[in-house]
Image (cartoon, helix red, strand yellow):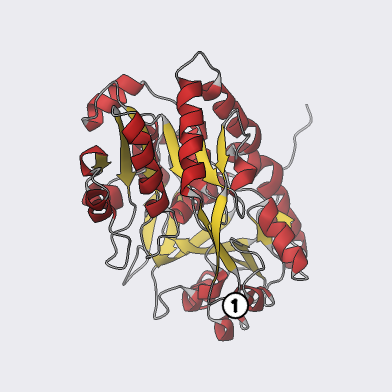
Amino acid sequence: MKVTAPKRRDMKIIWSSNAVFSNSGYGVFSRDLLFRMLRDGWQVAQTANWGVQGYPVYLHGEDLIDDRFKGLKLKVYPTMADPFGTDGLLEHGRDFGANVHFVMLDMQTQNPQILSQIKNLIPYAPVDKSPAPMQVVDRFRFANRIITFSKFGKETLADAGFTSRLILEGTDTELLKPKDKKEMRAKFGLPPDVFLFGMIAANKENPPRKGFQEALEAFKLFSEKHPNSAIFFHSQQMNPGGFPIQEYGKQLKISDKCWFINPYVGVFKSDSHTVAEEMSCFDVLLHPSQTEGFGLTVVEAASCGVPAIVNDCTSMPEMIIPGKTGEICKSGVKMFTNDLSFSHRADVQSLYEKMEVLFDKLSKPNTIAKDCRDHVIANYNIETLYETYWKKLLEELQEEFVPVGPK
C-alpha cells in the first residue's frame, strides 16, 4: 500500500482583520477561513484591529462555531496604538515569526509608513468604488500581491494599473441554511403571516452607506399598497454617527411597521447561527448599498433561501441572478466623494418596483428558495473556495517565501 507523505505546512501566516468572534462581516469571514487553515495544518495567528485589547487570547473552534473545529486553537493578538491595526500587523507579525502578512480591512485605513516596513504583505481587501480611490491605490503599492473579493474589484484595480487574483468571499452553507419560517418568526416574536423585508447591516455613517434611507422610503410606498408588511433591522454596530433609522421611520409614519433586534443582542450576542435564524424569518433581504466591496449578507441570505434586492453599482450585481435569486434596482444620484471617486444612491422608485416584483413572484408557486441556495453552493461555498483557491494560493506562497522545510 502506497503511503502519501503529508503536505508541508511550514509557512507562518498572520491575518489582520476584525476579531474572529466579533461577528462583523470581516470577523465572520475571517473565522470561517482561518479555522479551515488551521484544520489544514497551517500555522496561523490573527491580529485584531477591533475586538481584543490588552493581551492576546486563545480561541477554540468549538467555542466559536461547533464541533467541526473541535481541538483547534487560534491565537488572537490585541489592538495596539493604531485603531486600524497596521502596527499590530507589523509588531505582532514579528512576534509570531510570520512569513506572510494578510490584511482584510479597507486599505485606506492602513498606515502607509508602517506598510512600507512589512515584508510579504498581501491585502485581501475590498475595492468598493470606481475609480479606485487614490488612498486605496497608494496602499496597494506596498503589496507583494493583491487578492480581490469581486470581479468589480479586480476590474477596477486593473484600470488603476494593478494585477490581482480573484478569490470570492463565501459563507458556510452548513451554518447558513434554511430554517422553518414559522418557527423562527415565533422565536423572534414576529407575526407568522406578515410579508417581511429585512436588513442586516452596520450603521456607522450618515448619509448611510448601506442605504437605510432609500430602503425606508421604498418600504413606505410598498406598505401603502400592502398593509400587512413590515421591515426588520439588525444593525451590527451602535454608533452615534449612524443614521437615525427609528426616527426616520417615525418621520415617514411607518414606525409601527419597523422592527428592530435589541441593539445589545445584535452587537454582542449574534453569530452565524443567529443570522441564519433571522434570515429565515425574511421574505426578502434589502441591500441597496451606495458602495460595496462584496456584500456578504446577500450571499448569506441566499444560502438561507432568501432573495435579495441590491443596487446597480459596484460589486452587488455580481451576486444576483435577476429573476431567479433576487432583483437589481437602478442607481439614482451619483455622488462625487472626498476620495475622488463616486458613491451611488439607489433610486427609491426603482427599489420599490423591485419589491413589488418579488412580492408578486413569491405569492405564486416558485423555485426562488432553491435557486438561491443552489447559486450559493455553486459559487460561494467557503469549503469549496478554500479547497479550490486558498489552499493552492498558500502552497504557492510557501514555495516562494519558505522554499525549504525545517531540517
Classify 10 Å Cα crowding around label 1: few (below 14), some (14-19), many (20 and above).
some
**109 up-or-down from 18: above or below:** below
Q: Amino acid at mark 1?
A: Gln
Q: Residue at coordinates 41% horizontally, 29% vertically from top-left?
A: 283
Q: Residue at coordinates 60% horizontally, 28% vertically from top-left?
A: 324
- The location of residue 120, given as percent across then percent down, is 67, 71
Outermost residue, bottom direction?
Answer: 113
- The location of residue 38, given as percent across then percent down, is 54, 49
Q: On the image, numbered disc 1 is attached to which residue?
A: 135
In the image, is 14 to the left or to the right of 304? right
Quarter of the view holding residue 122: bottom right
- The location of residue 370, given as percent across then percent down, is 55, 21
Residue situated in front as seen by the camera: 393 or 303: 303
Of the 4 image quadrants, the one containing the C terminus is bottom right
**357 up-or-down from 140: above or below:** above
In the image, is 51 to the left or to the right of 6? left
Residue situated in front as seen by the camera: 220 or 236: 220
At mark 1, the secondary structure is: helix
Q: Is residue 392 visible?
A: yes
**323 up-or-down from 343: above or below:** above
- The location of residue 24, given as percent across then percent down, is 41, 54
